[in-house]
Image (cartoon, grey):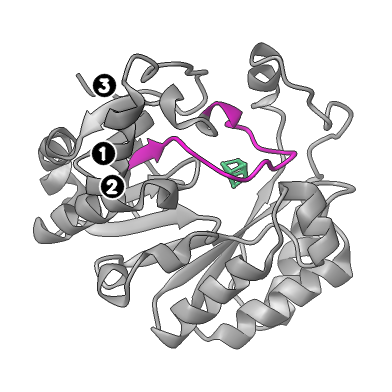
């Protein structure tokens, strides 16, 4: 049963009983995926009112990640694509009426690219607006034809300086930027999501570099500056992992506004 659940609840080991071969088959065929949770009625994960499928699996290790339980794919519940589509179909009319759609987030959805592609194609076939939220690292797994089934990509750009990016996320930034350039060449509507973390991502010069890059792409419809928060701290504790940001406070509204202003002065819509 696919119940609506909050991504802010801790989930572990929901798919632990599945044999390794079944996991591999699922990933290869996309007939089954792993979902951390399934939210209805979201107004903060893309345009309008949305159903959000939160996938498990992420190869990054962002210091500020508020959903570290999504890192491990088998923490998610195994769901057939048929079941996910059946569930989505229930909300189809409402999503259309409320100018919303389906968002697939995570984790990083592109860890389960075949499942995601099938779900997006099914959503598109029922005329539901489609969106993915990703760090872009595995963007190359999607063909241009597959990208054509996505109406909007929300791309997380964490920071600009490569050394800082690697320290913050465990991965270099270049593949994210390459995916952004590809989306630009395809004229794919894109929103940039930027998490403002005091002391980690709030260097004005770094933000200005992201702003300059994003403005030059020509396909960025908006930038969302998301203030860091501590809502995920308990997950780190319960998973027995060392959390490095205990002492970091949420940025002030003024600091968020200053970051937005940097994006705006590059000609972008930022909020
Ligand atoms: S990319 Fe997203 S899900 Fe993955 S570690 Fe970073 S914040 Fe967490």
Labels 3, 2: front one: 2
Q: Is residue 185 left or right of residue 32?
A: right
Question: Pointers 1 and 2 in contact (CB under 8 A)?
Answer: yes
Q: CA distance from mark 3 to mark 1?
A: 24 Å
Regarding mark 1 in the picture, which secondary structure is present there?
Answer: helix
Q: CA distance from mark 3 to mark 2?
A: 25 Å
Pinpoint residue 110: horizontal percent, then vertical percent.
42, 52
Mark 2: give few (<14), some (14-19) or many (20+) Cα within 10 Å. Answer: some
Residue displayed at 71% across by 61% down: 172
Residue pointed to by mark 2 = 28
- The quarter of the rendered structure image containing the C terminus is bottom right
Is residue 189 located in the magenta-colored stretch of the structure?
no
**Ligand 1 - quadrant of the structure image:** top right
Residue 135 seen from this side: yes
Pinpoint residue 178: horizontal percent, then vertical percent.
57, 75
Residue pointed to by mark 1 = 25
Q: Which mark is residue 129?
A: none
User: Which of the marked residues, 3 or 2, is nearer the chain's N terminus?
Assistant: 3
Work out whether residue 103 or residue 108 is closer to the camera in this orientation and state it: 108
Residue displayed at 40% across by 84% down: 187
Q: Quick check: 236 above or below 192?
A: above
Is residue 68 located in the magenta-colored stretch of the structure?
yes
- The quarter of the rendered structure image containing the N terminus is top left
Exactly how many numbered labels are in the figure? 3
Q: Which portion, as a residue range, is magenta?
A: 52-69
Residue pointed to by mark 3 = 3
Q: CA distance from mark 1 to mark 2?
A: 5 Å
Indicate the quadrant where residue 267 lies. Answer: bottom right
Q: Quick check: 23 above or below 222?
A: above
């Amino acid at each position: 049963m696919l119940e609506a659940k909050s991504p802010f609840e801790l989930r572990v080991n929901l798919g632990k009983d599945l044999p390794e071969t079944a996991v591999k088959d699922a990933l290869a065929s996309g007939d089954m995926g792993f979902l951390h949770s399934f939210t209805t009625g979201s107004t903060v994960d893309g345009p309008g009112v949305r159903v959000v499928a939160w996938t498990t699996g992420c190869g990054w290790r962002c210091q500020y990640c508020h959903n570290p339980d999504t890192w491990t794919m088998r923490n998610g519940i195994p769901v057939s694509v048929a079941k996910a589509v059946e569930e989505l179909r229930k909300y189809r009319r409402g999503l259309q009426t409320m100018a919303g759609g389906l968002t697939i987030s995570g984790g990083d959805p592109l860890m389960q690219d075949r499942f995601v592609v099938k779900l997006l194609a099914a959503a598109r076939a029922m005329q539901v607006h489609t969106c993915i939220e990703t760090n872009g690292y595995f963007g190359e797994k999607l063909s241009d034809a597959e990208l054509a089934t996505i109406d909007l990509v929300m791309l997380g750009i964490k920071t600009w300086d490569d050394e800082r990016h690697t320290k913050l996320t465990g991965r270099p930034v270049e593949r994210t930027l390459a995916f952004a350039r590809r989306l630009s060449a395809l004229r794919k509507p894109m929103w940039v999501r930027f998490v403002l973390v005091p002391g980690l991502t709030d260097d004005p010069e770094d933000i200005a570099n992201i702003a300059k890059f994003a403005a030059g792409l020509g396909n960025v419809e908006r930038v969302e500056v998301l203030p860091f928060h501590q809502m995920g701290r308990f997950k780190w504790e319960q998973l027995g992992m060392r959390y490095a940001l205990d002492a970091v406070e949420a940025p002030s509204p003024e600091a968020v506004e200053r970051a937005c202003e940097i994006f705006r002065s590059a000609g972008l819509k930022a909020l």
